[in-house]
Image (cartoon, rainbow, N blue to C red):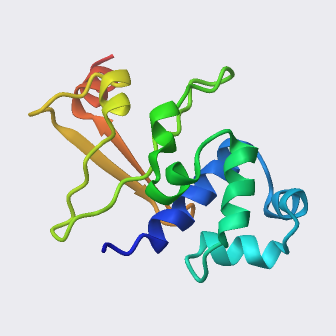
């Protein structure tokens, strides 16, 4: 059986951020310490079944969605700024990733498109931009 501990931690972090909870706020709502939430999100431990159930109820998803990281099927655009959470992807042995279907639809990405990968080490973030968009910006 595949180890899902990392996926669960990443899913919990994404859900907490999507619902705009701090670690402290979430801990208080579900009756655990902030350190417990941090350990779950950092893949150092896993919540027990009752806490998974509490988290699923809080976020309006199933326990299965927490375990499998499948809450992304319900991804939605923020009403304010057009930002999305599409879900969690895993990096393959050779560094490949599969973009979630909704992200490909929203950003009109198709097989064969060229993508530019950008990174910000200080913010620990990576961005992917269609090369066509960069060309349009440069030529304007």
Query: In terms of image quadrants, where is residue 37?
Result: bottom right
Name the residue at 56% across, 25% down.
77
Kindly give the residue lying farthest to the left in the view shown.
Answer: 112
Residue in view at x 79 percent, y 63 percent: 23
**Left or right of residue 116, residue 30 in this image:** right
The answer to whether 8 appears left or right of 17 in the picture is left
User: Percent x, y for residue 45?
Assistant: 61, 81
Number of numbered discs overlaid on the protein picture: 0
Q: Quadrant of the N terminus?
A: bottom left
Q: Which residue is rendered at x = 32% and y = 72% of the image?
A: 2
Q: Taking 42 as reference, is 20 above or below it?
A: above
For residue 129, above or below residue 6 = above
- Front-most of residues 19 and 124: 19
Residue 89 picture location, percent across and down: 36, 54
Judged from this view, the residue extending furthest toward the top is: 140
Residue 94 appears in which quarter of the rendering?
A: bottom left
Counting from the top left corner in percent of width and height, residue 4 is at 42, 69
Frontmost residue, 114 versus 8: 8
Please state if 16 lies on the left or on the right of 96 as rendered. Answer: right
- Which quadrant would the C terminus be assigned to in this image? top left
Coordinates of residue 92 in the picture (x, y in percent): 22, 65
Residue drawn at (85%, 75%) of the image: 33
């Amino acid at each position: 059986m595949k180890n899902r501990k990392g996926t669960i931690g990443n899913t919990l972090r994404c859900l907490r951020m999507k619902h705009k909870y701090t670690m402290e706020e979430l801990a208080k709502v579900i009756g655990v310490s902030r350190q417990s939430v941090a350990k779950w999100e950092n893949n150092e431990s896993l919540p027990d079944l009752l806490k998974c159930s509490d988290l699923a109820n809080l976020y309006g998803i199933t326990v299965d969605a927490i375990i499998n990281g499948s809450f992304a099927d319900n991804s939605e655009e923020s009403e304010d700024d057009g930002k999305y959470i599409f879900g969690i992807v895993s990096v393959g042995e050779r560094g490949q990733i599969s973009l979630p279907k909704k992200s490909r639809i929203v950003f009109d990405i198709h097989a064969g498109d060229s993508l530019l990968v950008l990174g910000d080490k200080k913010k620990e973030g990576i961005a992917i931009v269609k090369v066509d968009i960069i060309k349009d910006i440069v030529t304007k």
